[in-house]
Amino acid sequence: MGNYLKKGFLLGLGAAVSGKEKLEQKLKELVDKNELTQDEAKSMMDNFIEKGDSKKQEWSVKQKKQAQKMAKEMGIATAEELDELRRRIHALELKLSDKEVIEE
């Protein structure tokens, strides 16, 4: 499953890079023909990059959720679950040490 995610991600990344290069080329042509100003072209490119960053974050969240789902199905504890257990153990140790002090 992880291999499919990796291939999908790389395919998307390749398409994005190719798309960015084609967009840069097209914007340059439009600027050269005076159909767009340099500022308009820059604004369009910034918008393209911003959308790419947004999708990257979306993919990251989906990948994390998928990894957590797989870990749960395999019976592997997540970092958050381990941290919660550590907190609970620490609280119990404090209660035991307080009880031992009272009994002495």
Image (cartoon, rainbow, N blue to C red):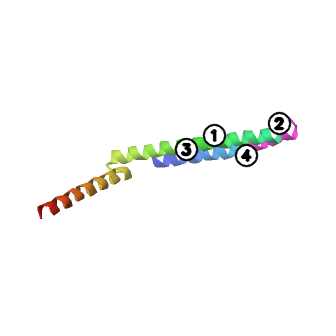
Sequence-first disc among 2 and 1: 2
Residue at which label 1 appears:
51
Residue at which label 4 appears:
21
Quarter of the picture containing the C terminus is bottom left
Sequence-first disc among 3 and 4: 4
Q: Residue at x 67, y 43 (%)?
A: 49
Sequence-first disc among 2 and 4: 4
Question: What is the magenta range?
Answer: 22-35
Dot 2: within a 10 Å radius of its alpha carbon, few (fewer than 14), some, or many (20 or more) residues?
some
The reply to whether the C-beta atoms of the residues labelled 3 and 4 are less than 8 Å apart is no
Question: Circle 2 — which element?
Answer: loop
**Residue in the foreground of this view, choosing between 92 and 13:** 92
Q: How far apart are labels 3 and 4 at the CA level?
A: 21 Å
* Three-letter residue code for mark 1: Lys
Please give left or right for residue 91 compared with residue 31 in the image. Answer: left
* Three-letter residue code for mark 3: Gln
Mark seen at residue 57: 3
Residue at which label 2 appears:
36
